[in-house]
Image: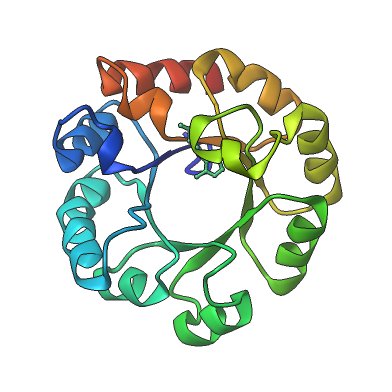
Amino acid sequence: MDELGLCLVTDRTQTRGRDLAAVVGECLAAGLPAVQVREKDLGASDLAFLCRRLVGPVRDAQAMLVVNDRVDVALAVGADAVQRTHTSLPVDDIRAIAGGRLRIGVSVHSLEGAVDAELKGADWVTYGPIYDTPSKRPYGAPQGLERLATVARGLRIPVIAIGGITPERVKEVRAAGARGVAVISAILTADSPATATRRFLAELA
Ligand code: TZP
């Protein structure tokens, strides 16, 4: 599976009390190709501790480890990539710090943001929310499939769709031009995160 095909984005508050590292391990064993550690409330030390619990299983599965926002933590734990958000260091600074040691994903919410990220040297953009999703309601209406298609057409780098993605929606977001999908709740809150992962992978195949 293409490592950009399916990325589990973490939120340890959504695991229904299960240990996040155990849930991620189960998903990796099911074939998950990428994990983005996104725990906004953790400081650098706790974030690095969590990432280090995940590095071994991620490596064993030959998957990709992405750290949200923190280029320092990404480098310290030997991650593969950093995911830039609108409050992160600019792509130029990330590149200056990380050199060729990290790939850079950029979270964007508009065509302009996506084009700018590509120009600055992003390796991919994550665009969304495509569908309604509770955590993003305060920021307005979802982007929808048509805008996703416009962004995908306007870029050369891969576009990853995020926000309200379920296995049932994979085919239409791919048809709109997304290279892959990034998912929180449809995997983390599932009765069986491994089964949910397999359902995504089957739709992506
Ligand atoms: N960025 C855009 S939507 C979103 C993020 C982090 C939340 C995605 O969560 P879910 O549960 O997969 O809709």
The residue nearer to you, when weighing 143 against 9, is 143
Left or right of 84: which side holds 70?
Answer: left
Which residue is found at the position 35% from the left and 46% from the top? 63
- In the depicted structure, whether residue 171 falls above or below residue 2: above
Marks counted in the figure total 0
Residue 69: image quadrant is bottom left
Q: Is residue 159 visible?
A: yes
Q: Is residue 205 visible?
A: no
The residue nearer to you, when weighing 177 against 164, is 164
Which residue is found at the position 54% from the left and 23% from the top? 204
- In the depicted structure, whether residue 167 falls above or below residue 81: above
Q: State the residue lying farthest toward the front.
A: 138
Left or right of 189: which side holds 94?
Answer: right
Which residue is found at the position 76% from the left and 28% from the top? 145
Residue 203 point in image, percent of width and height? 53, 16
Structure colour scheme: rainbow
Left or right of 130: which side holds 68?
Answer: left
